[in-house]
Amino acid sequence: MSKKFIILSLILITYIIAQDYSGYAGNYLYNGADARSIAMGNGLTAGTDLNFPAYFNPAGVASASNRKLLFTHQFLSLDRRQSIISFTTSLPPVGGISVGWIGAGVNGIDGRDLAGVHTDELDATEGAFLISFGIAPIQYLQFGGTVKILQNQLPNIDGNIIGKGVGFDFGVHYNFNANLNFAFVIKNINSAYQWSNKLTDDLGRVYKDKFPIQIRSGVQYKISSLIIVGDVGSYLADNELLGSDYRIGVEYTYNNNYFFRAGYRNDRLAFGIGLKYHQSNKFTSLIDYALVMEPVASLTHVISYAINF
């Protein structure tokens, strides 16, 4: 009886801690980059050959062997939406660069005036523009950094309220051998929305809505046609630990062109499939789909299209 009680207590404590960072700004940045990564639980801090490597670890940009163009859209419940577009290319002889836009928002907000009378359907938008650079000074070691330009626009009866900010990521990637990789990344350094509107301007006040700093370490291991990924992360704000989480995922490749995936993170199970086909000697397209089962928001569908050339 006592053993069961201890196990249940640990599960509840882990759940509670894991939710501490969910009330902070920037949650949309945790949703994933594309259908492949989402289907693998987003545990790709040490991942290789990614469509948008800068999203997980800017050090991975240094390993880009060709040009990658990615489009992703997530069909979220509760009138939410999120899309990503990115471009990554190598910078010979030892570097790479990536740029991308992550956009999220909510549609159909019921706008009302002070008397409670309906006025309009309102939208809220949030986004980040990422510029990343990676370098591999020696064969097995890569470093990288990202500058994130942040913006959040909230609707208001007197006009939109806009929050802006700039943040940074820094990562390291180590290739132990052809099948085993380790990585470490610090994300959201100095990231915060600084809000500006008529009320705060008149009062001479500046309000900042901080993003929690995220520290993650991960591993990727290849076994024949199977890739296993996993990472663990901690979230901090004002030198206080808000919580931690872990992510795991697998991908099985069949006949070099068909992919089957599964992953887990934060009480979310995900499954996905993918297809790769060659349009010519220089162009390769990838179509990926992911299904995410969330405990509160039901099902999420994600579709991605990537071109390597």
Image (cartoon, rainbow, N blue to C red):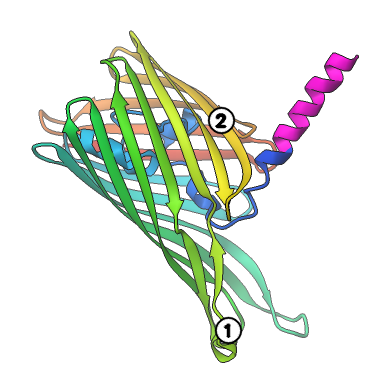
- State whether residue 91 appears in this view: yes
Residue depicted at 61% across the width and 72% down the height: 121
The answer to whether residue 31 is visible is no
Residue at the image position 61 percent from the left and 34 percent from the top: 266
In the image, the segment drawn in magenta is 1-15
Q: Secondary structure at mark 1?
A: helix
Residue lying at the far bottom of the rendered structure:
202
Membership of 4 in magenta stretch: yes
Q: Read off the residue under disc 2.
A: 246
In front here: 90 or 66? 90
The local crowd at label 2, few if under 14, some if 14 to 19, many if 20 or more residues have their Cα within 10 Å, is some
Q: Which residue is located at x 81 percent, y 28 percent?
A: 9
| 118 up-or-down from 58: above or below | below
The picture quadrant where one finds residue 93 is: top left
Q: Which image quarter: residue 306?
A: top left
Give the residue drawn at x 54%, y 69%.
208
Give x and y (percent) for residue 192: 49, 63
Tell me, yes or no, whether the highlighted magenta stretch contains residue 136.
Answer: no
Instruction: Depth check: give the residue in front, 79 or 197.
Output: 197
